[in-house]
């Protein structure tokens, strides 16, 4: 299974005129549904085409314009997901539905082939159901609820994907593999 977390250009308020939020980092981590083992984390930096990285975005993600300018195009990033991670043929998950919706919208807007299978699991929803939480919570709160330390930098795609995979591994141990079938 692939665990995916994206970071996107963002602003404290509305985007500046002529700019739109777009993916600037794709974090990926694998999770073995057989063993529950969390794999290595990976980061794909994506060069924005319709926006720039704001000071607010840098404070949140630590990503700078200079870093993402060295990234690949969105189309190339999607090709990397298909070629290196077999994303079109694997179940994948994210914390909530934002990442899936952002990919769908950006692929449509940029006329790029959607890189993932239709088999998406909302780990946030699955966490809430597994641990009988009354209200949804953020990834950092979920880690705390499981008494797991947050590893890496929060709001960096690769670190967040790794942390979400750790949460999914606990759910897998609690509920079994059938919870990750779609």
Image (cartoon, helix red, strand yellow):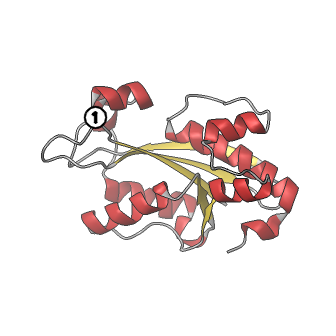
Q: Count numbered badges in the picture.
A: 1
Q: What residue occupies the far front of the structure in this picture? A: 134
In this picture, residue 166 sits left or right of residue 52: right
Image spot of residue 163 (x, y percent): 66, 40
Quadrant into which the C terminus falls = bottom right
Image spot of residue 175 (x, y percent): 84, 61
Quadrant into which the N terminus falls = bottom right
Image spot of residue 7 (x, y percent): 43, 43
Badge 1 crowding class, 10 Å Cα cut-off, few under 14, some 14 to 19, many 20 or more, is: many
Residue 68, located in which quarter of the rendered image? top left
Q: Mark 1 points at which residue?
A: 53
60, 45: nearer the viewer:
60
Q: What residue occupies the far left of the structure in this picture? A: 17
Residue that appears at 13% across and 47% down: 18
Residue 56 to residue 90: above or below: above
In this picture, residue 119 sits left or right of residue 179: left
Question: From this viewpoint, is residue 62 visible?
Answer: no
60, 38: nearer the viewer:
60
Residue 179, located in which quarter of the rendered image? bottom right
Image spot of residue 58 (x, y percent): 36, 28
Question: From this viewpoint, is residue 25 visible?
Answer: yes
In this picture, residue 17 sits left or right of residue 38: left
48, 55: nearer the viewer:
55
Residue that appears at 40% across and 54% down: 77
Residue 168 to residue 114: above or below: above
Residue 109, located in which quarter of the rendered image? bottom left
Residue that appears at 35% across and 32% down: 57
Residue that appears at 22% across and 42% down: 15
SS state under label 1: loop
167, 141: nearer the viewer:
141
């Amino acid at each position: 299974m692939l665990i995916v977390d994206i970071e996107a250009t963002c602003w404290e308020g509305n985007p500046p005129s002529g700019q739109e939020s777009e993916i600037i980092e794709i974090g990926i981590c694998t999770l073995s549904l057989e063993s529950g083992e969390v794999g290595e984390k990976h980061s794909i930096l994506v060069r924005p085409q319709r926006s720039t990285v704001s000071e607010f975005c840098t404070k949140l993600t630590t990503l700078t314009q200079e870093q993402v300018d060295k990234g690949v195009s969105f189309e190339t990033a999607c090709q990397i997901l298909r070629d290196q991670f077999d994303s079109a043929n694997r179940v994948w998950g994210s914390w909530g539905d934002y990442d899936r919706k952002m990919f769908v919208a950006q692929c449509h807007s940029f006329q790029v082939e959607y890189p993932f299978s239709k088999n998406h699991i909302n780990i946030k929803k699955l966490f809430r159901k597994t641990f009988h939480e009354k209200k949804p919570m953020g990834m950092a709160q979920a880690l705390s609820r499981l008494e797991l330390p947050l590893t890496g930098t929060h709001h960096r795609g690769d670190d967040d994907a790794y942390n979400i995979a750790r949460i999914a591994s606990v759910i897998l141990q609690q509920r079994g593999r059938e919870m990750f079938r779609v």
